[in-house]
Image (cartoon, rainbow, N blue to C red):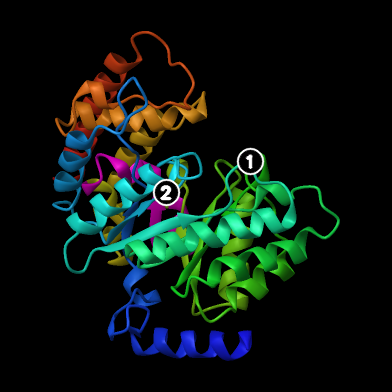
Amino acid sequence: MQDRRDGVLGACAELGVSRRWGREEAVLSANELRGGVFPAVPVPFDVTGRVLESAQRDYVAWMVEQPIRGVAVWAHTGRGLRLDVPDRQRVLTAWREGLRPGQWLIAAAGAAGGATEVGEVLAAARDMARHAARLGADALLVHPPVAFRGRSDLQQRILDYHSAVAEAGIPLILFYLYEEAGGLSYDFQTLAKLLNRPEVLGIKVATLDSVMTFQDLARLIQEEAPGKVLLSGEDRFLGYSLMCGAEAALIGMGAACVHPQVELVRAFLDGLAARFLALSRAVDELARLTFRVPMEGYIQRMLWCLVHEGVIPPAATFDPWGPPLEPGEFDRLGEGLKRYWSFVAEAGR
């Protein structure tokens, strides 16, 4: 029965239609991913931990004007596994209603930290995936099942977990998050099996600073699943990840200052070497400013970037689960952003 269901889903994906709402409609395909930048968007909380809905609306209105291919909600940047169900719904609905035709909505799905037993983990991931599908997500980014870390049957449980998420009936994007970066290591045999599932469009790879791991995974994807899309999750080496074979980007850094990041991807794909190198210098500067120790502080830093860009107010930059940042860092970030934009200006000359 599962094989039959997967075959039907794969056929629908190839045709570019879906019947999950009881009618034919466009669905996200691998080709729609290629060449795109998909910001993983944060949530604007106030100091009480409440979603500041006016700031959320302003953020959506600003982002849809950017040259993005879509956004990813409920990812780590959006604290998806920590949000309660009403806030998840509030956030996804705001983006679903705000995105324009041709802009796609990806929702991350997985099991929150409280789930530990196998059945509990699978049920939690399945429920979150189905919730996203009901709310109108176009695809699911699958959070790694870190609750299974250390199990002797880890690789089989990884396969079971993805099967549970796939029951939502919409396309999947795998997520390989390097274990040392807080994720889970899938062996190459397991990864190959997942990549060859018909509902899988591609894989986001985020190794943080392990260039060798990224290189090896890029080669695996090219050899074992050449039709699937490698999406860079490498904020600290975005440009080089494109050189390794990434065809798109799904990154937290895209949450702000995103236009030059889109131009960087375009410059590489168009073979504009000088422009690509100049934009890499600029984007690397932004990454250095925002993705640094303490690494979990990057979410608040990206929200601060939005303040400096005039998108949201300072009152909407609280991260309830983030570490305290150094006094004066907001102002230093502002100075750093001036350098970033000066590098962007030089790239345009």
Q: Is residue 185 above or below residue 181?
A: below
Mark 2 residue element: loop
Quadrant of the rendered structure where residue 252 is?
A: top left
Inspect the magenta stretch and tell me whether residue 243 lies in it: yes
- Residue at the disc numbered 1: 114
Mark 1 residue element: loop
Residue at 34% in and 45% down: 41
Residue at 54% in and 71% down: 166
Quadrant of the snapshot with the N terminus: bottom right
> Which stretch appears magenta?
240-259
Quadrant of the rendered structure where residue 47 is?
A: top left
| Precedes in sequence: disc 2 or disc 1 | 2
Badge 1 crowding class, 10 Å Cα cut-off, few under 14, some 14 to 19, many 20 or more, is few
- Residue at the disc numbered 2: 74
| In front of the other: 297 or 84 | 84
Q: Is residue 45 above or below residue 206?
A: above
Task: State the CA–CA distance, disc 2 to disc 1.
Answer: 17 Å
| In front of the other: 8 or 104 | 8
| In front of the other: 102 or 8 | 8
Q: Is residue 1 left or right of residue 152?
A: left
